[in-house]
Image (tube, rainbow, N blue to C red):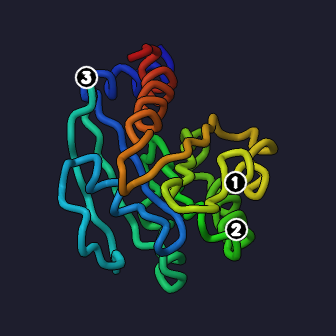
Amino acid sequence: MGLFTIIRKNRQKEREMRLLFLGLDNAGKTTILKRLNDEDITGISPTLGFNIKTFAHGRYTLNIWDIGGQQTLRPYWRNYFEQTDAIIWVVDAGDRLRMQDCKRELHGLLSEDRLAGASLLVFANKQDIANSMTGAEISKALDLLNIRSHDWKIQPCSAVTGESILDGIDWTVHNVANRLYGTVV
């Protein structure tokens, strides 16, 4: 029995997944997390550190780490990489001016050894705003088609309306479950 098999069997008992919510400041990470937990989304202020939420999704327990995206906090992101099963990269689809910065940060993350193999969901958030970028536009701006090191999906969504958030989480859970436990949810 190999090490990978032992790890898989151990984690299968737990049925837990660690999801890391990252993205530039004001992308909507905390709003999406609160929407998932059916919490009030009015009056959300910038995350100056991190938030942790745990909830059940199907047969799995999701431990979600929401990390602040301000430029001064980004060097600390690496402190949260250990045992991450999936990265949820949240993009402000209305912020065309920072797409290059968003691309640079994302590709920097994906080169980190401790995130090797983690599933990647890109939430193209704020689709409820006029003239927001489409999923295809964001995919091109972030050069997603050239990502070969991670399974990925882009999911247009709106944290305000809740549209398509669960679709993205469902994909993430399915992808991680298949990779870690050899099962499909």
Q: What residue is pinned by disc 3?
A: 59
Give yes or no for contact between labels 1 and 3 (Cβ–Cβ under 8 Å).
Answer: no
Q: CA distance from mark 1 to mark 2?
A: 8 Å
Q: Quadrant of the C terminus?
A: top left
Looking at the image, residue 182 lies above or below residue 41: above
Residue 54 as seen in the image, left or right of residue 172: left
**Callout 3: 10 Å neighbours few (<14), some, many (20+)?**
few
Q: Nearer the viewer, mark 1 or mark 3?
A: 1
**Callout 1: 10 Å neighbours few (<14), some, many (20+)?**
many
Q: Amino acid type of disc 3?
A: Arg
Q: Residue at x 54, y 71 (%)?
A: 24
Residue 13 x %, y %: 25, 22
Q: What residue is pinned by disc 1?
A: 138
- SS at mark 2? helix
Give yes or no for contact between labels 1 and 2 (Cβ–Cβ under 8 Å).
Answer: yes
Q: Nearer the viewer, mark 2 or mark 3?
A: 2
**Which residue is most to the front?**
130
Looking at the image, residue 75 lies above or below residue 89: below
Residue 93 x %, y %: 59, 60
Which quadrant of the figure has residue 142? bottom right
Residue 140 x %, y %: 78, 51
Among numbered discs 1 and 3, the one appearing first in the sequence: 3
Among numbered discs 2 and 3, the one appearing first in the sequence: 3
Q: Amino acid type of disc 2?
A: Met
Q: Residue at x 45, y 24 (%)?
A: 174
Q: Amino acid type of disc 1?
A: Ile
- SS at mark 1? helix
**Which residue is most to the bottom?**
72
Q: What residue is pinned by disc 2?
A: 99
Q: CA distance from mark 2 to mark 3?
A: 36 Å
- SS at mark 3? loop
